[in-house]
């Protein structure tokens, strides 16, 4: 049985997340209050709420938002503009979705260039790259480890949570074997038990994206 202190430690890995289409300010405010109460790594919210969270909570609450979400097929210029605006609004972390069409075309140079463009727009803020593993084969996953590393991103992230599948331990282990030493791993999507959270952390994840933090850890 995991003790209370251990659960408090786990919160430091959690991006406390609410990305549903109909999220209201009341729900976002509740998410933020929970994140502060329990010591979450960040709140991960839609871009339209970032500035309002900053006005309400100031610097005490790390805010993560998403760009190119959830399908990733926006142009690179649009994603870069989204990233710049998110930073201006006060986001400290960005989770971007790659262009899966480029992956299927095996145009990994273009994928790398897009990630690098967003990286440059972030002015040193944390960049997590969502590769949506449910649509990838092993060779594509390995190639994307190289693209994420070469582009200078901080994290490779398994999933949006909106695809046909979520995080898998096998993928985390594959990433760990192929990313560069400066790249960390975030697991997200379908993580519904405390046992799964701890298994992903033990497998090498530095962040866990979940909307179930309170349910699982309190």
Image (tube, rainbow, N blue to C red):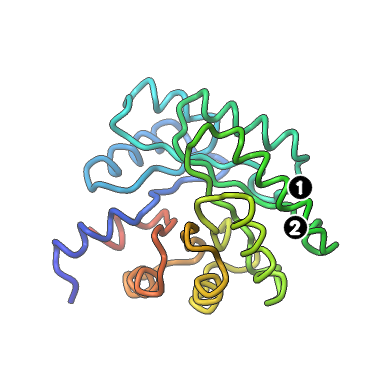
Quarter of the image containing the N terminus? bottom left
Residue 80, position in %: x, y? Answer: 67, 34
Q: Residue at x 38, y 73 (%)?
A: 196
Q: Is residue 186 left or right of residue 1?
A: right
Residue 61, position in %: x, y? Answer: 32, 35
Question: In the picture shown, does residue 100 fall above or below 193?
Answer: above
Question: In the picture shown, does residue 171 fall above or below 131?
Answer: below
Label 2 close to label 1 by CB (< 8 Å): yes
Residue 8, position in %: x, y? Answer: 20, 57
Question: In the picture shown, does residue 155 fall above or below 124?
Answer: below
Q: Residue at x 28, y 31 (%)?
A: 60
Q: Is residue 12 left or right of residue 140?
A: left
Residue 138, position in %: x, y? Answer: 68, 77
Q: Identify the residue position indicated by label 2 in the image.
A: 100
Q: Residue at x 40, y 57 (%)?
A: 207
* Residue at disc 2, secondary structure: helix
Dividing the picture into quadrants, the one containing residue 118 is: top right
Q: Residue at x 63, y 62 (%)?
A: 132
Numbered label attached to residue 20:
none
Q: Which is more N-terminal, label 1 or label 2? A: 1
Quarter of the image containing the C terminus? bottom left
Q: Is residue 97 left or right of residue 24?
A: right
* Residue at disc 1, secondary structure: loop
Q: Identify the residue position indicated by label 1 in the image.
A: 73
* C-alpha gap between disc 2 and disc 1: 7 Å
């Amino acid at each position: 049985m995991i003790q209370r202190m251990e659960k408090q430690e786990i919160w430091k890995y959690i991006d406390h997340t609410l990305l549903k289409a109909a999220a209201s300010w009341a729900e976002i405010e509740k998410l933020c209050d929970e994140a502060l109460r329990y010591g979450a790594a960040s709140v991960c919210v839609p871009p339209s709420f970032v500035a309002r969270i900053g006005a309400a909570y100031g610097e005490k609450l790390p805010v993560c938002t998403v760009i190119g979400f959830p399908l990733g097929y926006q142009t690179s210029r649009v994603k870069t503009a989204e990233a710049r605006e998110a930073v201006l609004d006060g986001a400290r972390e960005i989770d971007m979705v790659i262009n899966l069409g480029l992956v299927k075309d095996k145009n990994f140079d273009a994928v790398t260039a897009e990630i690098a463009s967003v990286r440059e727009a972030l002015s040193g803020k944390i960049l997590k790259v969502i590769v949506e593993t449910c649509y990838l084969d092993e060779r594509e996953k390995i190639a994307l480890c190289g693209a994420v590393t070469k582009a200078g991103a901080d994290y490779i992230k398994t999933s949006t949570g909106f695809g046909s599948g979520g995080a898998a331990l096998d993928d985390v282990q594959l990433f760990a074997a192929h990313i560069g030493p400066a790249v960390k791993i975030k697991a997200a999507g379908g993580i519904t038990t405390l046992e799964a959270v701890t298994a992903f952390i033990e497998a090498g994840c530095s962040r866990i994206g979940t909307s179930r933090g309170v349910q699982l850890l309190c």
